[in-house]
Image (tube, rainbow, N blue to C red):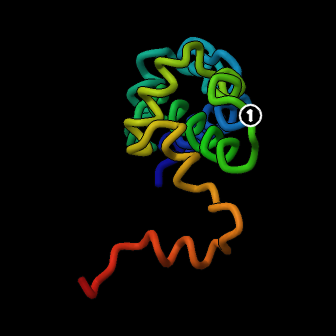
Amino acid sequence: MSRAVEESNRAMLRARDAMDRAYAEPLDIPTLARVALVSEAHFIRTFRATFGETPHRYLQRRRVERAMSLLMESNRDVTDICYAVGFGSLGTFSRTFRQIVGQSPTEFRRARRPTPGVPSCFTKAWTRPSSFG
């Protein structure tokens, strides 16, 4: 690997690490490009080439991953979680969540909540598709 490629990879990793640390903050391309010490256009192109997705999509995915965790671990409202992970509107959050996960945030939470009084091992066994049918 050439020195230039190695330096470029480090710059993209710095920007990605900044997104991972501050995913809930309002991050934009100019800010991230400054972190990587490159122009905005070069940043978008190089980030996509390095990680296989645009910086915007990466940030959305990180936010949705964090939202998934909060939906499973807490009783916070979906709207509360939406803003806590950095989305500016519930509509954008719900649409993006569905695109990435395949379910709405409420459906995701409902599907992962244990049935009261039933051990989770039984719940999982009864919700799995049967291969005997």
The picture places residue 24, in percent across and down from the top left corner, at: 69, 26
The picture places residue 107, in percent across and down from the top left corner, at: 49, 43
Name the residue at 44% across, 29% down: 96
Name the residue at 53% across, 37% down: 105
**Outermost residue, front side:** 117
Name the residue at 67% across, 37% down: 20
**Residue 32 sits in which quadrant?**
top right
User: For this view, does 34 lie left or right of residue 104?
Assistant: right
**Residue 119 sits in which quadrant?**
bottom right
Return the residue at label 1.
Answer: 76
The picture places residue 127, in percent across and down from the top left corner, at: 45, 69
For the question of whether residue 8 can be seen, the reply is: no
**Outermost residue, bottom side:** 132
**Residue 30 sits in which quadrant?**
top right
Name the residue at 47% across, 35% down: 97
Report helix, strand or loop for mark 1.
loop
Image mark count: 1
Along the viewing direction, whichever of 84 and 26 lies nearer the viewer = 84
The picture places residue 70, in percent across and down from the top left corner, at: 70, 42
Q: Is residue 47 above or below residue 88?
A: below
Q: Amino acid at mark 1?
A: Arg
Q: Quadrant of the C terminus?
A: bottom left
For the question of whether residue 38 can be seen, the reply is: yes
Along the viewing direction, whichever of 113 and 34 lies nearer the viewer = 113
Q: Is residue 83 above or below residue 12?
A: above
Q: Residues within 10 Å of mark 1 (few under 14, many from 20)?
A: few
